[in-house]
Image (cartoon, rainbow, N blue to C red):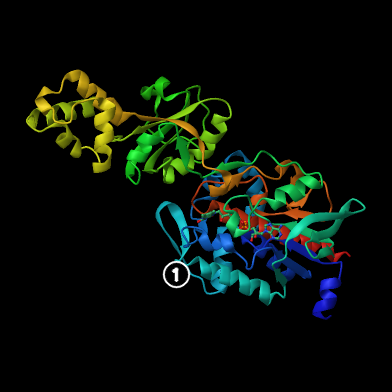
Amino acid sequence: MSRKDNFQSACRVIVVGAGASGMMAAGRAAEKGARVLLLEKTDGPGKKILISGKSRCNLTNARDLGDFIAMYGPNGRFLHSAFRRFFRDDLLAFLRRYGIETKVERGGRIFPVSDDSADVVGAFRRYVKERLVEFHKGANVTAITLRDGRIGGVMTAKGPIPACAVILATGGATWPATGSTGDGYRMAAAIGHTVTKLRPALVPLVVAEVDRAKSMQGVSLRNVRMTAFRGTAAAIDPAQAPAKDMGRGVDTKKRRSQVIESRMGEMLFTHFGIGGPITLLMSLAVVDALAEGPVSVSIDLKPALGVEALRARLQGDFDRSGKRGFRNLLADLLPRKMIDPFIEMTGIPPERPGHQITAGERERLLWQLKSLRFNIKGPLPLTSAIVTAGGVSLKEIDPRTMGSRLIPGLFFCGEVMDIDADTGGYNLQAAFSTGFVAGESAAAGVQGF
Ligand SMILES: Cc1cc2nc3c(=O)[nH]c(=O)nc-3n(C[C@H](O)[C@H](O)[C@H](O)COP(=O)(O)OP(=O)(O)OC[C@H]3O[C@@H](n4cnc5c(N)ncnc54)[C@H](O)[C@@H]3O)c2cc1C
């Protein structure tokens, strides 16, 4: 059959979107014997893979299956079946076939040894080419078309294309320059699918005290504990901050306290608020809590010291170096850029010698160090988030096939579904695994035609 005949044949699988999930789905469907057309609206495949993991591509994670699934929150259950069919070891074996060796880093994060995400895109390019997938770039799909209640094909800017099966792999709505502009949500909703509320996940947060954050812009703090609370910063009870991490994937027990999540690690001050790894990890829970009322965060800058130990240390330091001024004493406790903001927040004159600092003033400093607070105004926009939370409702997708429960012949994979996870390689693994299953199922569906 000529390439043209193939293109005109209705009994093909169309994959919409050549990202992580779409390329896997297209290759797998073709491997299983289907004729496959892969449509990508940008000028090339895998643009989001290219920027992922700071262009090093954190492909997956070495954690055990149970811990792995916990990283997706309650919706992780949906992935059990897909992970049984195609999980981490399968992905690594697949990549090895294309010459990509991998390495495990801190937190179980798995990267290509080359530290180059272009190699991963290269592997998928070869996979789809080898399997004779017909690939059209610059092909913008505008709608999914139906015929007699089942899939009829897709509509593109250049006209309709018939198909027996369509796999929607259009990704989320973040970083639109990569092509993921949320089209899939609109197309799925237009044919009757429910799309749950879209929210930014893994996103920096804007604070109300923006001038304070700005004055510390660029300061990156390691080994601090950040706790998010329901309510305003003034109402925070720092005694409620847990000593251990609490949140998705670590400790998910629901408690009565005002605490939303708590994480220890690295954070960053920016010109609008707070960012860095622990802020991103906590951001979705904060975004969801903001829908119900005010949210604030408390940062413990000295989590290794309890209140009593820090009190004793401050007293000892200030007594021993009694002649040094407050500004100089702060230099032993904080990064340079945080000294002026701390002078302002404590109201202690910068030149006041240590031995003249009163117990009350020391207490003010102590609590600024143990509970530096900010009121959260909101997240940066969805377009700046790493992933989109929400998407096509999982209730309407069969987890064994990734098939629509509403429209025969329609399949979903990747971020367009209501699946998102923490950083660590989980989002890409979900895209690859669900792409694999969607590809296989779509191919099985068209064999009968
Ligand atoms: C900065 C950044 C870093 C990240 N780093 C990591 C990481 O290290 N590890 C990790 O696990 N996850 C990471 N992620 C998340 C991960 O990249 C995504 O979750 C994953 O790529 C989703 O795969 P997908 O196939 O669903 O969608 P995408 O990879 O976004 O692909 C969707 C494709 O569909 C195309 N498309 C959209 N609409 C249409 C249309 N109408 N017609 C035709 N084509 C269309 C798009 O152009 C795009 O090519 C990162 C995300 C970002 C933004």
- 364 left or right of 96 in image: left
Neighbourhood count class around disc 1 (C-alpha, 10 Å): few under 14, some 14–19, many 20 upward: some
Which image quarter: residue 234? top left
Quadrant into which the C terminus falls: bottom right
Name the one closer to the observer, 308 or 355. Answer: 355
As displayed, is residue 61 above or below residue 223?
A: below
Q: Is residue 77 left or right of residue 317?
A: right
Residue for badge 1: 114
The percent coordinates of residue 100 (x first, y second) are 51, 71
Vertically, is 360 above or below 340?
above
Judging depth in this view, the residue of 26 and 196 nearest the camera is 196
Question: Which residue lies at the image location 51% right of the left edge and 58% below the top edge?
Answer: 52
Query: Is the residue 51 above or below the residue 95 in the image?
Result: above
Furthest toward the right, the residue is 148
In the rendered image, is residue 332 in sight? no
Quick one: SS at disc 1? loop
Please identify the quadrant where the N terminus is shown: bottom right
For image coordinates 50% across by 39% down, the residue present is 283
- The amino acid type, in three-letter code, at marker 1 is Ser
Using the rendered view, name the quadrant where residue 214 is placed. top left
Q: Position of residue 310 (x, y in %)?
A: 22, 29
Q: Would the CB of label 1 be found within 8 Å of ligand 1?
A: no
Q: Is residue 321 visible?
A: yes
339 vs 143, left or right, is: left
Residue 344: x and y, percent?
27, 29
Kindly indicate the quadrant of the structure image that contains residue 338.
Answer: top left
Residue 336's spot in the image, x, y percent?
23, 42
The residue lying at 93 percent from left, 53 percent from top is 148
For ligand 1, the image quadrant comes to bottom right
**Which residue, as the protein is rendered here, is positioned at the far bottom?**
2
| Count of marks, rendered view | 1
